């Protein structure tokens, strides 16, 4: 892995990567050292000279990394932000070296976003170097965070998803937290609506999904003459944009409720679903699983071997349980059989439903490890290691988990609408829906709520077998379940609308569409509120 403390090595490594990799690493490196600015905001004038241009540079570079489709349109704004942050770095150097290098990291991160040529690697390497210099006591932790980011992308995570992740792999360092707390306190006490930036940075620290993409783009593309007026004018305009967007959202919801009269008026969201559907032989059936993707270093034969290993190990453990080789509950075999039922095989299967079975198996094992035979625990550990290893190859699965992690429930999922939708689907099976549609909607049974893994040594003193850590173990189970159900029904609504072109039994389709309409609309509006779309 590249040594990010070596600028030449960093530039050489980045020169072989897509431009998006340079943009996201530069942006994240700069964002991590923003707390060092707490040393320069006294006197008050420094806020306008240094802090605001630094936030501007970081906002533009972050938007370019999170929404790459906007990168071309952002270039003139990134160039202007680069110039402004460069001047701020010069001003900061008079006050504190760390603040100067932090601001330098911001302006070179903006330069990466504004540059369409091969110079992006050089600018990004400089931004990384400046950020590490600003990090001071946190230099080692910052370098490790960069290495973690690079490793996740090598394993297949896209730069776009990485841009939305928390800034630190584990948690913010104590010195950075103290610096940010001090900077945040001083900014808020200065007035001038600085909460539009302190809230923004808190969201970047936590990896929280932007409420509205349009707002992030609007923030990054404010005109030069407004920035020149200073924080009072800039922050007031950002606050106005936020209020206007909230009012527009509320108005759209009212209009949506009034305008839905038939299934053709239904407006499902264009977002990933853990389960897909398709028309097949005149009825709606479960769609094929998302195809796995290869990372830059992956061999397709290696991926095929990994997937085959998942199947064979699951089959082997299930067979041993069936033969009485292991003294364990029948639920372990049920989870393994569920995994095998849904595990992708060509166009069949569903990786999300298979993954749910694997996680349910792990949670059960964590809770009962003390009472289980060590050979059984070792076998299941090997299976879980194989399964967790193939997750990065299924981008839609990662995107769904990312959405779950970054969203909070605005309000509980309207369970009555869900129950009524399920009942209507069951009654229209098999005339309109294939039997596997109802099975896919049944996500109530797992995985159970998160269980903390016990300590490594049991009461007997015998060392326990350590289970592989699950990167998504901390997902809120209620948010996941609610999000999965809502997204699945949203996807079903999309396909249901196509009925006149594909359905065999038009009368049955019209009947179930009319019955489903109010429930699907309620669920889609809940999902719209949850995702901020």
Image (cartoon, grey):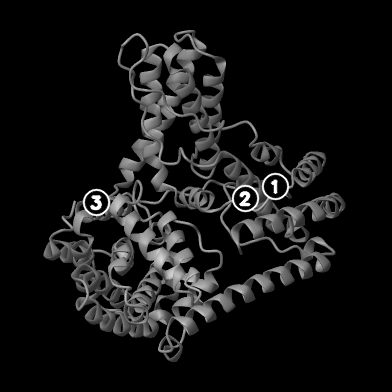
User: Reading the chain from its start, which is encountered first: label 3 or label 2?
Assistant: 3
Image marks 1 and 2: residues in contact by CB distance under 8 Å: yes
Secondary element type, mark 1: loop
Residue 310 seen from this side: yes
- Residue position marked by numbered label 2 in the rendering: 409
> How many labels sit on residues?
3
**CA gap, disc 1 and disc 3:** 40 Å
Residue 282 appears left or right of 194? right
Secondary element type, mark 2: loop
Indicate the quadrant containing the C terminus: top left, top right, bottom left or bottom right: bottom right
Residue 159 appears left or right of 432? left
**CA gap, disc 1 and disc 2:** 8 Å
- Residue position marked by numbered label 1 in the rendering: 413
Secondary element type, mark 3: helix
Within the image, what quadrant is residue 57 found in?
A: bottom left
Image marks 1 and 3: residues in contact by CB distance under 8 Å: no
- Residue position marked by numbered label 3 in the rendering: 141
């Amino acid at each position: 892995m590249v040594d990010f403390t070596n600028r030449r090595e960093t530039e050489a490594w980045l020169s072989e990567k897509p431009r998006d990799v340079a943009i996201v690493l530069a942006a994240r490196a700069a964002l991590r050292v923003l707390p060092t600015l707490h040393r320069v905001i006294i006197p008050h004038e420094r806020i306008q000279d240094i802090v605001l241009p630094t936030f501007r540079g970081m906002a533009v570079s972050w938007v370019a990394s999170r929404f790459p489709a906007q990168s071309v349109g952002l270039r003139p704004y990134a160039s202007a932000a680069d110039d402004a942050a460069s001047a701020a770095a010069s001003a900061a150097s008079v006050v504190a070296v760390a603040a100067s290098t932090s601001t330098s990291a911001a302006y070179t991160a903006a330069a990466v976003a504004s540059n369409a040529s091969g110079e992006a690697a050089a600018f990004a390497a400089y931004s990384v170097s400046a950020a590490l210099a600003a990090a001071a006591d946190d230099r080692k932790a910052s370098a490790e965070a960069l290495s973690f980011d690079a490793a996740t992308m090598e394993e297949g995570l896209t730069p776009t998803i990485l841009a939305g992740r928390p800034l630190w792999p584990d948690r913010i360092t104590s010195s950075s937290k103290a610096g940010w707390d001090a900077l945040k306190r001083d900014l808020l006490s200065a007035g001038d609506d600085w909460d539009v930036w302190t809230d923004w940075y808190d969201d970047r620290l936590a990896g929280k999904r932007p409420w509205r993409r349009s707002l992030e783009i609007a923030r990054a593309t404010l005109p030069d003459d407004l920035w020149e007026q200073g924080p009072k004018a800039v922050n007031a305009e950002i606050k106005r944009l936020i209020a206007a967007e909230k009012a527009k959202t509320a108005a759209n919801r009212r209009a949506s409720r009034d305008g839905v009269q038939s299934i053709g008026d239904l407006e499902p969201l264009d977002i990933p679903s853990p389960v897909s559907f398709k028309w097949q032989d005149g009825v709606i059936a479960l769609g094929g699983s998302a195809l796995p993707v290869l990372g830059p270093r992956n061999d397709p034969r290696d991926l095929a071997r990994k997937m085959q290993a998942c199947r064979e190990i699951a089959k082997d453990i299930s067979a041993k349980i069936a033969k009485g080789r292991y003294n364990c509950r029948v639920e372990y075999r049920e989870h393994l059989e569920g995994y095998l039922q849904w595990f992708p095989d060509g166009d069949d299967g569903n990786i999300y439903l298979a993954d749910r079975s694997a996680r349910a198996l792990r949670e059960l094992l964590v809770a009962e490890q003390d009472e289980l035979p060590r050979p059984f625990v070792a076998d299941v550990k090997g299976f879980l290691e194989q399964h967790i290893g193939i997750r990065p190859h299924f981008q839609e699965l990662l995107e769904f988990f990312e959405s779950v992690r970054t969203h909070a429930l605005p309000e509980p999922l309207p369970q009555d609408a869900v129950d009524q939708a399920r009942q209507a689907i069951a009654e229209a099976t098999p005339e309109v829906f294939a039997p596997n549609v109802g099975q896919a909607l049944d996500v109530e049974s797992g995985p159970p709520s998160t269980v903390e893994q016990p300590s490594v040594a049991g009461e007997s003193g015998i060392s326990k077998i350590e289970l592989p850590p699950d990167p998504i173990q901390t997902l809120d189970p209620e948010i996941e379940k609610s999000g999965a159900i809502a997204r699945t029904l949203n996807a079903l609504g999309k396909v249901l609308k196509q009925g006149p072109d594909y359905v065999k039994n038009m009368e049955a389709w019209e009947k179930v569409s009319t019955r489903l309409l109010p429930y699907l609309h309620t669920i889609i509006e809940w999902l719209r509120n949850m995702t901020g779309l």
